[in-house]
Image (spheres, helix red, strand yellow):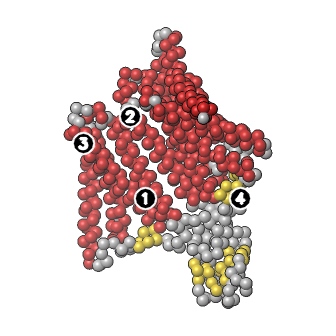
Amino acid sequence: MDPFGYLGALCTESPRTYKKPLSASGGPRLTLPSCRSRGQSLNRQPVWSRTGAADTHSLVTPQQGRGTAWYFTYMEILNLTGVSEFLLLGLSGDPELQPLLFGLFLSMYLVTVLGNLLIILAVGPHPHLHTPMYFFLSCLSLADTGFSTTTIPKMLVNIQTQRKSISYAGCLTQVFFFSLFGCLDSLILAVMAYDRFVAICHPLHYPAIMRPQLCGLLVLLSFLISLLDSQTHCLMVSKLESQNLTGVSEFLLLGLSELQPLLFGLFLSMYLITVLGNLLIILDVGSDHHLHTPMYFLLSSLSLADIGFTSTTVPKMLVNIQTHRKSISYSGCLTQMCFVMVFGGMDTFLLTVMSYDWFVAICHPLHYTVIMSAHLCGLLVLVSWLISLSYSLMQSLLMSRLSFCSRRVIPHFYCALTQALMLACSGTLINHILLHMVTAFLVIVPFSGTLFSYTRIASSILKIPSASGKCKAFSTCASHLSVVSLFYGAGLGVYLSSNAYSQKGMIGSVVYTVVTPMLNPFIYSLWNKDMKGNCKKLLGENSMITEKKAGCGVLI
């Protein structure tokens, strides 16, 4: 606990003393040791001690040796608890029982691993066992193997070496995988129960309901939920020892330009158009049951993600312009980064799912209703949300463990992750590795899926003999192709440029964070007759209601 609120200023060039009056007679002095060179750990552990004066205290190091009356131990960076390992008491402390426990748990572990591996190997090479039931059984066996491997080997090592310790990092790792495989076990058991329910209660519809695509998505969904649960547990545990020891309470966002009044009016109008246009699409799709199809469901989901994407960045920029301030708090910056990653990832995945929807509609029109069922569409959107949320939580967890020194200027109009990593004065290797790996997954994989879908669509359209048929087929997916080109063109142009955070780079960021969400309602409404007609009906009904209310007011 920090009694005077000064422990955030740990990283300083030289020892400093901070004063804050406690009474009329004097005040406490908080002396902080200087940091070591960048990348090295802090070896000196300051302590809180009485220095002799009646109401004056100072934070000193053991090397200084001032006073011995009482101490308040300050907690180190990263592991604030001062604990490098934990002790696992085990099942029994009796030395005579340790060989028995070792043999018992070793035999159970070997039976568990070999038995579950045998099930996986038995299901794999035999085609007649490639059914939903045996697929779920092999997934459960894999989860059980991981669940047992998380705990038993460490216990066996501790028994054999007669040690009961586990490192701090090892404990967090064990908590992570224990939560992951435990939750995965429970979810797969629930899926297997649903599989038996369909097989017994709806045997005629079993092959149509429990298709391979649905089974794979159910397992993937179970894994993603388990991963999200384990990340949340690790985040909560690490928060017990993670604080903002950076000395930085806020960052400065330089913004786009000095033309503040013009930018305020421009971005306010674009934000209002974005929110109102996308809300109109959501209301239009929800109010007309004829539009309750996979294409419009995915379109309304994209509109919701666009509203969130724009609302994450533009309102804060407008507030800063209006108040002539460029600051954003440390927690506000982390929150903004988290939601930018969530809604940005959602946009990329939803555009890919919509491309797949068009691919099925054009290349396999007779099987469209069977393939793009309501369950599959809901699962695809849910998986997109879970992947985006998992990545944002992972990056937020790693960012919260970094420390920042004096540099706090972000040359952008929002808290960009890569730019914030450049300001850190602690090691960012893991952050950069995760950033490049997941960025490749979140950008290259969806873009490749979109490119593959439109390549197949183009080849199918070219096979149509009549020119009018080709134009009609192309016009159906032209709106989505325009949005995809605008989004990926601006995004890839920014992040593949040599200086992504120059004025030109920020303008490119504006295109895919503000302009593209604003143009989406216009593009889909102009190219789609159903949307255009329903929007006119919706606006016409509202105008009629307004006229009736005005007429009633005149009569009164």
Instruction: Give the number of the disc on residue 374.
Output: 2
Residue visible at 40% across and 40% down in the picture: 379
Give the distance between the C-alpha atoms of the residues marked 1 and 2, in whole angstroms. 33 Å
Q: In the image, which is nearer the foreground, mark 4 or mark 2?
A: 2
Residue visible at 64% across and 40% down in the picture: 271
Counting residues from the start of the chain, the first of labels 1 and 4 encountered is 1
Observer-nearest of 40 and 461: 461
Give amino acid for label 4: Arg
Where's residue 197, x and y in %? 24, 42
**Residue 283 appears left or right of 321:** left
The residue beneath circle 1 is: 176
Give amino acid for label 1: Phe
Give the distance between the C-alpha atoms of the residues marked 3 and 1, in whole angstroms. 32 Å
Neighbour tally class for label 3: few under 14, some 14-19, many 20 plus, Cα within 10 Å: few
Check if mark 1's residue and mark 2's residue have beta carbons within 8 Å. Answer: no
Secondary structure under tag 2 reads: helix
